[in-house]
Image (spheres, grey):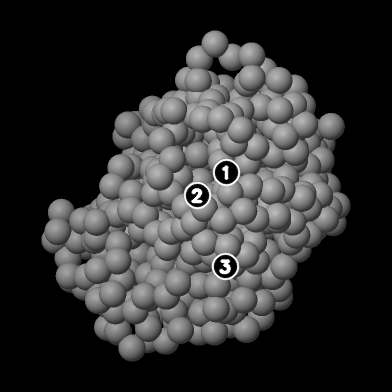
Amino acid sequence: MRIGIANFSHESNTFAADPTPLDAFRIYRGQAVIDHYTHTFHEVAGYIAGAEEYDFELAPLFSANATPAGPLTVEAYETLVGELLDSIRAAMPLDGLLLALHGAMVAEEYAQADGETVRRVRELVGPDFPLVVTHDYHGNVPPQLVADADGLIIYKTCPHIDQRERGIEAAELVARTARRNVRPVSAIVKPPVIFNIAFHNTSSGPMKPLMDAAIALEKEPGILSVSIAAGYQYADVPWMGPSIVVIADGDEALAQREAERLGEMMWAVRDQLVPRIPSAAEAVATAMESSAFPVSLFELGDNVGGGSAGDATIILEELLRQKADGWVVSLYDPESVQQCVAAGIGGQVDLRTGGKLDSQHGPTLAISGRVRTIHDGTYEETERRHGGARYGDQGLAVVVEVNRSAPGKGGLLILNSKRVAPMSIHQITCMGIQPQQQKILVAKGAVAPRAAYEPVSARIIEVDTAGATSISRPAGKFVQARKELYEWSK
Ligand SMILES: [Zn+2]
């Protein structure tokens, strides 16, 4: 038995300033898919491990993914989906396909691009071909996608640390389907709520009992898989919002009944979904008064893993205004990196940095300092962290000492040349910074950085800031999203 494996993933923020072009994608073809993913915690690693466990031959086809940002250009989507389809066609005959799609991809001409991808794949392979799809927990699943696939399996953790297990589960489902051991039938329910990202942590809060119920249901007879996607609120698309997907073995009524039961459970917690989160001024003051360090401040409005700019200055400006010491902030600013490289290690620089990509993420600041480190910006993560990646690259990067009147005074500003989400602590340790020796670490994210930052932080404070991923004030208006959705948090 021979099963194709492919990956085409992007989380697209329709409130981000710029579209995502073709050259933003990292692409692997054929054997390179296996070489890149085998030693990661990504679901494609789970597909690979599953081949051995469930005794099938792998046909590695194609992989493309890019850092979250705006919707894909027409050229990017059509080129990549075209190559995906060509790779499937060339590998035929196959006995089934495992397809990793993010679930929140938007292309300029398709609001629900993953649904369009699955539609085209199904059209190519025909109605009786086993097709199992995996999604990120932040997918905005359209019902038609669930109808077009034989099974949809979604990560159960946020931060996402179970991707590999979900990949193995998908491998089992496609193998059992291809062998006619099971006949998967699915139901999807989409409760009319916006499950705010402030509540996406699966280890606490209103999501934990829902996920516990999903996991308990999977142990019931006749149930093959139960998934909950929290949804992705930074995309104005028709099926924005959470989804509950139940896969049963041949019993459509059972799948529908159980999906509706979990949907009622989610609807019942809707009043718990209003975030109360401090401003930058409040959070910095609280961090400075803390008795234990470091305190990590999560900058919610500039959630790089959610598609924002990566150069927000809102917390940095407060750290400077309140004269905080011992802070570490990262900004995406390739122009300032070049200026620091030109000055050399030990050189003094006068920078205008941050707030350059758009007008949503705070002002550009005038900052002077001394260049302390220049680094190629690559690092390796061997622990299980959100996203499952092993190889990190923030591009050519520098550390600038700011207001460093004495050791421990002032702060350390990391400037990098590639937008990078703070999913690995090695993004800062590779720059020669020991997190436990600092007082305030700023991470541009919401829930995802917890896997990397909880082990080194005395405390984490989420901070309500403006930006393309603001949790309380969307950067744009919803036009396409369903009107019946529970009101966006005020
Ligand atoms: Zn996610």
Q: Which image quarter holds the C terminus?
A: top right
Disc 2 Cβ-to-ligand 1 distance below 8 Å: no
CA gap, disc 3 to disc 2? Answer: 13 Å
Query: Quick one: label 3 or label 1, which is nearer the N terminus?
Result: 3
469 with respect to 252 (left or right): right
The kind of residue on which mark 2 rests is Arg
Report crowding for label 2: few under 14, some 14 to 19, many 20 or more residues within 10 A (C-alpha).
many
The kind of residue on which mark 3 rests is Ala
For the question of whether residue 439 can be seen, the reply is yes
Residue 431, compared with residue 8, is above or below; it is above
Name the residue located 49 percent from the left edge and 64 percent from the top edge: 396
The residue tagged 2 is: 372
Residue 5, compared with residue 159, is above or below; it is below
**Residue 168 in the image, given as x and y percentages of width and height:** 27, 51
The residue tagged 3 is: 342
Q: Secondary structure at mark 3?
A: helix
Residue 256, compared with residue 59, is above or below; it is above
- Residue 38 marker: none
